[in-house]
Image (cartoon, rainbow, N blue to C red):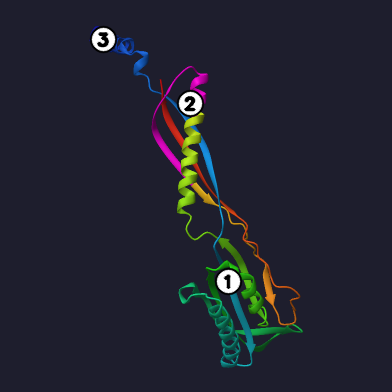
């Protein structure tokens, strides 16, 4: 029985050695992995921001009336500047009591009504003047002005093409240094991103006492879209 096991083991070793000896250098799959990034500059054509009113009243209905009056002014200004209804969205509506602490005791001072809107403006030429007009309404808050490109598809396509060409050129360079040639891609993966040229988190209290000596200017600048490609290619 022992001799039989030894014989079987020896046969397996022989098979492994035979298969190994049959493999040539052509049977080995050699690969190279490279990555590259393509960048394209775009000009923003839309602006988005949030705007909020928050008013204190003796009663809830009084606070609501104050907030509704200011919100009506804001909506009128935005519509006059070409902001479409589809681009004005209520993101928060809040009614709550407001308390004060006096000598360690809590007292109800009134009711607060708050409302926030998310706004998109598709004509950047009107952004500065519209902000000036909004600033004429006292006691409001303007948050997170962000400039963006509405359709980035063409820029992303160009960035992808750049990334692929750079990755292939890099693979060719490495292969030449190793005295080999590049074959077909085995896998390709991609990561894309877009920078934002103007994204402020400042909370500006737009009060009537803040007089404007000059019109607000918000340069659009440029933004960058990038595509990073990683490729695994055959080498022979």
Mark found first going from the N terminus, 3 or 2: 3
Query: Which element carries disc 1, helix, strand or loop?
Result: strand
49 is higher (above) or lower (below) than 196: below
List x then y, in percent, for residue 148: 55, 60
Q: Residues within 10 Å of mark 3 (few under 14, many from 20)?
A: few
Look at the image and tell me in which quarter the N terminus lies: top left
- Front-most of residues 94 and 83: 83
Asked if residue 205 lies left or right of residue 146, the reply is right
- In this rendering, position of residue 89 left or right of residue 124: left
Quick one: quadrant of the C terminus? top left
Q: Where is residue 80 in the image (x, y as percent from the top left)?
A: 55, 80
Out of 138 and 54, give the one closest to the viewer: 138
Residue at image mark 1 = 50
**x then y, percent, for residue 97:** 60, 85
Q: Who's the residue at 37% across and 14% down the image?
A: 25
Marks 2 and 1 close (CB-CB < 8 Å): no
Give the camera-side residue of 133 and 145: 133
Which residue range is magenta in the image?
171-191
Tag on residue 11? 3
């Amino acid at each position: 029985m022992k001799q039989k096991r030894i014989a079987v083991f020896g046969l397996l070793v022989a098979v492994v050695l035979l298969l190994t000896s049959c493999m040539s250098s052509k049977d080995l799959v050699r690969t190279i992995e490279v990555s590259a990034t393509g960048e394209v500059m775009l000009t923003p054509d839309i602006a988005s921001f949030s705007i909020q009113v928050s008013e204190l009243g003796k009663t809830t209905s009084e606070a609501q009336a104050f907030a509704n009056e200011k919100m009506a002014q804001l909506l009128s200004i935005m519509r006059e500047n070409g902001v479409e209804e589809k681009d004005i969205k209520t993101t928060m509506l809040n009614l709550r009591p407001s308390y004060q602490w006096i000598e360690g005791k809590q007292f109800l001072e009134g009711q607060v009504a708050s409302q926030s809107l998310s706004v998109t403006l598709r004509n950047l030429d009107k952004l500065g003047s519209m902000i000036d007009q909004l600033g004429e309404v006292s006691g409001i808050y303007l948050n997170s002005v962000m400039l963006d490109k509405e359709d980035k598809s063409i820029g992303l396509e160009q960035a992808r093409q750049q990334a692929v060409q750079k990755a292939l050129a890099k693979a060719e360079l490495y292969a030449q240094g190793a005295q080999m040639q590049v074959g077909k891609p085995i896998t390709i993966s991609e990561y894309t991103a877009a920078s934002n040229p103007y994204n402020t988190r400042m909370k500006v209290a737009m009060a009537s006492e803040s007089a404007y000596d000059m019109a607000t200017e918000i340069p659009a600048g440029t933004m960058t879209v990038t595509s990073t490609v990683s490729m695994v290619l055959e080498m022979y």
